[in-house]
Image (cartoon, rainbow, N blue to C red):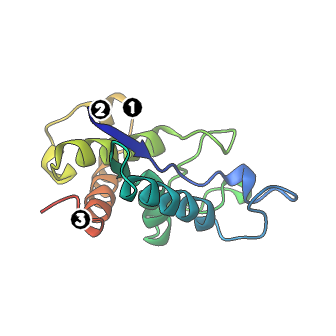
Amino acid sequence: MVVDLVATWSRADLTYRPGARWSGQPIYAMADELAAATDRAVAEGGGLTAAVAVGSAWNRAIRDGLADPNPYDGVAYGQVDLWSWDQYHASAEGYYLEALMVFGTLTGTDPHRLDGRERAADDLGLDPRVAARLRATASDELRARGRLG
């Protein structure tokens, strides 16, 4: 049996709201903590086979300037909001990035290979240029984590 754990994204509502768990810390902190804990759990074995680094991919999208780091102050021009209206769940772009990370982790296939071969981005209403950048982000993160050859 294959059991993979998803290390999810940072919650903006737990970072930017006063008194929340990660208040006053960079938006990357929660996802980094979850990624480290998930990697440790996989390394310890117990039937776990992989960590799906969704939060790390979100952090990469923010660091690379694709995604806005703070949805509470408005979305910067030319950037996407990975969070939905509640600053907890993902937007269409955020869930697309998550799906790309799951796809790449499970199959070992570079998300770049999906260019022009899948309909999910179009069905989600994503701008094709944004979808291409999200595929590049997922590809870069998967490669950095040793999930692609």
Left or right position of 111 against 24: left
Residue identifier under label 3: 146
- Which SS class for mark 2? helix
Label 3 is placed on what type of residue?
Answer: Gly
Any part of residue 115 in sight: no
Left or right position of 48 against 83: left
Tag 2: Cα neighbours inside 10 Å, few (<14), some, or many (≥20)? Answer: few
- Which SS class for mark 1? loop
CA gap, disc 3 and disc 1: 29 Å
How far across and down, in percent of the image, does residue 53 sit?
Answer: 40, 54
- Point out the image quarter for the C terminus: bottom left
**Number of marks in picture:** 3
CA gap, disc 3 and disc 2: 25 Å
Residue identifier under label 2: 120
Q: Quadrant of residue 136?
A: bottom left
Query: Which residue does the image show at 86% across and 59% down from the upper left?
Result: 18
How far across and down, in percent of the image, does residue 4 sit?
Answer: 35, 42
82 over 92 or under it: above or below: below
CA gap, disc 2 and disc 1: 6 Å
53 over 140 or under it: above or below: above
Any part of residue 122 in sight: yes
How far across and down, in percent of the image, does residue 22 sit?
Answer: 73, 61
- Judging depth in this view, the residue of 92 and 18 nearest the camera is 18
Tag in front: 3 or 1: 3
How far across and down, in percent of the image, does residue 101 sit?
Answer: 33, 48
Q: Earlier in the sequence, mark 3 or mark 2?
A: 2
Label 1 is placed on what type of residue?
Answer: Leu
Residue identifier under label 1: 124
Q: Earlier in the sequence, mark 3 or mark 1?
A: 1
